[in-house]
Image (cartoon, rainbow, N blue to C red):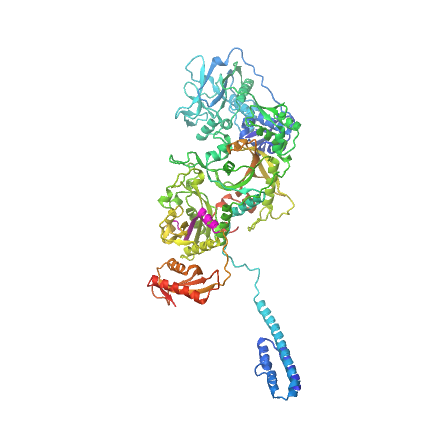
Amino acid sequence: MQDLKKLEKEAEKAIIEAADEAVLRDVEIKFLGRKGTLTSVLRGLKDLSEKKRRELGPKANTLRVKLETSIGEKRYDLRKKELNARLKKEWIDISRPGIKTAQGHLHPLTASLREITSIFHSLGFDAVVGPEIETEWYNFDALNIPSDHPARDLWDTFWLRQDKKSAIKEKLLLRTHTSPVQIRFMGKNQPPLRIIVPGKVFRNDASDATHDIEFYQVEGLMVDKEISVANFKEIIQVFFEKFFSSGGGSAFSVKGGPASGRGGKEKINIRLRPSFFPFTEPSFEIDLKFPGSKRWLEVAGAGMVHPNVFKNSGLNPKHWRGFAFGFGVDRLCMMKYKISDIRLLHSSDPRFLKQF
Amino acid sequence: MKFSYKWLKERISNIPKPSSVVDLLEMHAFEVESIQKEGDDFIFDIDILPNRISDCSGHRGLAKEISAIAGLKFKDKEPRLVESAEVTTKDAIEIKITDKGCVLYNARVLDNIKVGTSPKWLRMRLEAIGINSINNIVDAANYVMLDTGQPLHVFDYDKLVSKRKSKKLITVRGAKKEEHFLSLDKEQYKLSVEDIVIADDKSAIAIAGIKGGKRPEVDQKTKIIVLESATFSRGRIRSTSQRLNLITDSSRRFGAGLDPNLSKKAIDELAVLIQKIAEGRIYSGALSIGHKFPEIKQIIFSSDKARSVLGANIPDDEIKNIFTGLGFGIKPKIKNWVVEVPSVRKDIEIEEDLIEEVGRIYGYKKIKPVRARGEVVSAKIDQDIFFREKIRDMARSVGFDEVRLYSFVGEKELSLLSLDARKNVLELKNPSRSEYKYLRPKLTPSILMGLSEALKYADNPMFFEIGRVYRKPELKPAKDTPDLERSHIAFAVGNRIKDEESFLEMKGRIDAFFESLGLNDVWYDDSFQTPDEVTGGIAYMLHPYRFAEIKRGNKILGIVGEIHPDIRDSLKLKGSVSICELNLSVLLSEIESEKEYRPISRYPAVMRDLALFVPAETKIVNVQDIIENIGGQLLVDVDLFDIYEGEEVPEGKKNLAFKFVFQSHDKTLSDEEVKKVMDKIIKALENSDPSWEVRK
């Protein structure tokens, strides 16, 4: 009896004092191992008299369970302590740069085009595309710009060299705007309709920081029974607000675009100014002004579809009305990402491309 | 075009201050490029819209416009013409028009004029807007043009050559082939039959509507003058002006189209002004040869429609005021109105044009945004557009940076392609520069040039581009312009550190690209028996033993390969470069056909490894083909995870190590079942080539 009490005290002390798992293991072997002190007691029970065995047996077994539990708990504590010590050594300065992934970068124009397409999609506009090489008819005549019209000077045109064998007899050119797709689309689809046409266009113009010989445009067209200038104002207002207020909209981060550093409450100002396009009547330019800025920026051209454009598309202008608009994507993209030279958008310099 | 504030002020009662004039014009009519203070005057540079040249290219017209916008009174002054009863124009000259490009030709004659310097007020007017004073006659003609918008010309009567003694004949005719012309500023021009000239009996004395000639120039001795005020076809003036590259104040106005009625008024104004500042006698009766045009156009107008189109509730009275201010007449009918528009407003022909007048004078600013009525039908997403964007994302995710390069290429890029591929290239008639003379028939040359630039700044640049390529179709003639274009995607990898690696780097990435698009069964064919539209011209640029066509089944998707060392040298590429170009339409159709979901097996997969020695030159695809053919349905994946040459491998051989994945959709496979297939594969490999040795 005395022996068991002593044993218990001794064991408890050893368990408490064990400094690490190895020591604890030794303690465990010392008391509970095959030749351990308590094990010997338990083994020796069979040699005792029945009376003694009944007295000592349960006590020894209880002690065994108790010690096993204590060692288990101690081991758990020691492990936790050791783990913590090890993890502490594994500390990483989280301000260190992460390991670079192998992902590439999408072009900033892709980000802008996607955002534009998605905003208009939410307003019910389908995206459609058309050819970059056009005939004189689709690019000019059908849009109410006959060859002797002074407005043709508004578009410096690249013409294609054609030989006599050419199966297309009409004069070919690189489209100067996405507007020909209006004619192509209305020729095949009955209103009501809402479309946008993103695409590349070409101008034979001197190139500088704000002009390039090719750039991207988005054309919009909405046709229904009773469409008004007021309806156009609403659509274009919603579009520009969304475009410049969203922080990129998709997986693309916006670095210091005009949208940053502004509370969401102030609105972008939009105004319409009279203008002239042969394919719209009335026609206007769209200017916008960012909150806090004093300057109006010209961003788009628009107007109510000219009756001749409906006629040339095979629609009766008495039955249908609509608005059309067009804007340069490069310009918006430059405004949003603060890119200073339009020609950078055709660059293959990784130092530019990897910023997006 | 330049306009003087003081000049405009003469015509407008209580004209607002210059900055307000700018605001009014910008919000209701024209953009003002600049405003500059000149002495006690302000000079506006105004962008008169091309359809408003006919009425607003003179101070008078612009003043009328400003008055209408601001609701102010416009002061019109009719000139008081006093003709001499003793002499008549038709006794002095005769006009003959033989070219239809001249719509109307008016002429007047004055004699006893005194050529000299202009009065100060006139000189100042002209100089304010940058026109040099010449003499009182020329200045008067310029002044009347800047006031009315009608270009005018003055000839020295005595210098006109005539076959008859009694009168001079002025002919408006087509120029002769290669006819020579010496202009007032002593420039020589060679004309063509499409040009219109004003001629006397000897030769051309003016290029109609563009420039006067040297010979009949007014000088200090001039006593008798002929005034010309005409109207010409805008298209003819424009094309001559463009061909001769000669743009003048006159050609700019005629090229936009002018009102013939204006020419009649302007010539009288010029006669009156000359008489005022250079004395002289005005011959009676102006000559006016050509068509007559009504001075008023009548257009049916519905104010209800105008309100509906503008989306603004503008009262009838306000609309009437707008029209009256613009100088239009109104005749109310039962439902609609008849609006009478003066002929000088050439831009107004239909009801919509009148609606624009109402809208802009009323002010677009006052029109409130209104959501369109009618149901918003949710837009459809075009499958092609959707997958094109997915392709873009996947190309990016496997490490490529997107570029958007020019559609134009020059000789340099084309010279990289085979002669065959250059045959059908489309060329520009008027390129902006020779390096941009052609439309690219493939993406590869452009992206290669881009990459060679990038290699200057980066060790391992990787690009992709999705874009159109252009060519004359070979097989069937193009019916419409879409037949001249194709969409392609190209990839390029450059590596200037590990010289050998660009090809495998490319292949690994495009494999991952195809896999991410669900196209796991794309294969590489280096037999190159079937060059097609994508692959044909490009193979020529590639290393002959490091390129392949990319196929799925028998469909050719495109081509991949390392750039030929010759091209690498000639372009001075700083490293190894590989490219890949695919036909995007074929790729899209393959992706769309793969869209359906394939169920995942519920039973566990079993893995087995297999290694064999094969001769170093043996193609991996040949080994893999046998494995896949024999492996059948249960072998769901074969992965070559190691190729090893060197120690432990017999000389001239390489060790291939494969990992096989076996799986069934119906049950858990037993070891015996897998072993049966493995044994079959090993046997087939050993039988197919005695030099192949499966390692056991």
Q: Is residue B299 left or right of residue B617?
A: right
**Residue B83 covered by magenta stretch:** no
Residue A290 visible here? yes
B231 and B604: which is toward the camera = B604
Dividing the image into 4 quarters, which one contains the N terminus of chain B?
top right
As drawn, B115 above or below A107: above
Q: What x and y, as percent, mark residue A131? A: 47, 40
Residue B416 visible here? no
As drawn, B351 above or below B458: above
Q: What x and y, as percent, mark residue A1? A: 66, 86
What are the residue bounds of the magenta stretch?
B570-594
Q: How many marks?
A: 0
Q: Residue furthest front?
A: B666
Q: Which residue is painted at 59% across and 81% down in the image?
A: A32
Q: What x and y, as percent, mark residue B44? A: 58, 31
As drawn, B257 above or below A352: above
Q: Is residue B263 left or right of residue B409?
A: right
Q: What x and y, as percent, mark residue B242? A: 45, 30
B379 and B469: which is toward the camera = B379
**Residue B572 covered by magenta stretch:** yes
